[in-house]
Image (cartoon, rainbow, N blue to C red):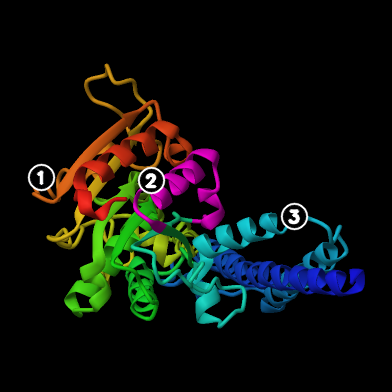
Amino acid sequence: MQQKSSSKTGKHLRHHVGGVAQLITHFGNEVVDVVQDVHGAVANPFSIRGKDYVPAPMVYQLVRYGFRQLGNVVGLTNILRDPSKERKEFLDLQSILNGIFGQLYEEQNSNYAITMQLTPNDFRPETKTLVVFAHGLCMNDACWYSPAAQSFARWVEEQFDAEVAYLRYNTGLHISDNGRKLAGLLDHTPLPQRVILIGHSMGGLVARSALHQARLQERPWAEKVTHLITLASPHEGAVLERLGNYVNRMLALTRYTKPLMRLGSLRSNGIRDLRFGYLVEEQWQAKSVNSLNPSPSVPLDDKAEQLFVAASTSASTEGNPSGDWLVDVPSGLGLRYYPVHPKLQRKVFYRMAHMTIIEEPRLYEYVQQWLHKTTPADARK
């Protein structure tokens, strides 16, 4: 039995080591290309393209070879580590790398790319309600295992005769791609009478994207969605991604810094979508990857009850509250895109940060009150 467990753990280790080594090799090649371009620009400042002058190309090939060997060394070192290490640590690492470079793994058909899944995916026939939790960028379903979140899960199971399921997905893909995949996943999942979607940060946008695409395609499960709750989701974009994109564009001003744009451009499609909160393919498809102007917003759902929750690190007494470090309050509430909507309610929580909002008891106390108030009595136990 111990030998079988050790073999399974070893296989698990090799899976994660392979993903990290693959990334090191790819990133190393990009770094070498950047260095080569900079060298060319410095050596021949009057040429139109830095690569017109390429000194000692064999040197660059040797450096690329070195990165490949570094990936192999990382792999060997990790395989020899303590095999009893917590698997959650590996899942967290995989989630982070998928969030930052997820489309690279997808394009390379890497088995390190996270496959979308719903856990559990088999529900009791007598269940009346399904509550789906969707995590944010670089995270996974383990983020919902805090005492406050689990207490809320037990409450909703009791009050709404519900079951709870957790979504895991590759956050580095376009939000529209994950929305399409979630719509297809729910379309092929036996669902109860009612569905409640709850998403944190990017997860809220993925839930909105899935519901919007399902409505357009007239998928039956969309009619079962009664509530959609987003927690600190950047409906109008995230300031940090817009700032990062601006800085990356500034690198194009000189021939000497322009090659560095390649490194900034390695960030995932999912991160790029957060610049303006894009939900569907049409919003980003016709735009430059470094565009400074947003596409028109996607309308809110006109059937499900919706709650947009924003967090602020400010005190409630401050007149102009700051954001939660990643998302400003107007974006979290969708104030500019959706000034008035009959199916939308908003709530701001003060002295609360972006990553800790899903661990706060006062958040779930409010959500309980809102669900109770917006749900007909005959739909509750």
SS type, badge 3: loop
What percent of the width, then of the height, locates residue 241? 37, 51
Residue 275 horizontal/vertical position (percent) = 32, 55
What is the secondary structure assignment of the residue under circle 2?
Answer: helix
Q: CA distance from mark 3 to mark 1?
A: 46 Å
Amino acid type, callout 3:
Glu
Residue 339, labelled with which disc? 1
Residue 154 on the magenta segment: yes
Residue at 80% x, 73% y is 8
Q: Magenta stretch: residue 21 in it? A: no
Measured from the top left, where is residue 37 in percent x and y? Answer: 53, 68
Question: Label 2 neighbourhood size at 10 Å, few (<14), some (14-19), many (20+)?
Answer: some
**Residue at position x 21%, y 53% from top?**
378
What residue did someone put label 3 on?
Answer: 86
Question: Height in image: 6 above or below 237?
Answer: below
> Mark 2 touching mark 1, by CB under 8 A?
no
- CA gap between label 2 and label 3 equals 32 Å
Q: Which residue is mark 2?
A: 240
Q: Nearer the viewer, residue 381 or 14?
A: 381
Residue 9, picture quadrant: bottom right
Q: From the viewer's perspective, is the residue at label 2 or at label 1 nearer?
A: 1
Judged from the image, the secondary structure of the residue bearing numbered disc 1 is loop
Sequence-first disc among 2 and 3: 3
In the image, the segment drawn in magenta is 138-162
Q: Amino acid at mark 2?
A: Leu
Q: Can residue 46 be seen in this snapshot?
A: yes
Mark 1 residue type: Pro
Mark 3 neighbour density, 10 Å: few (under 14) some (14–19) many (20 or more): few
Q: Along the line of sight, which residue is nearer the eye, 236 or 71?
A: 236
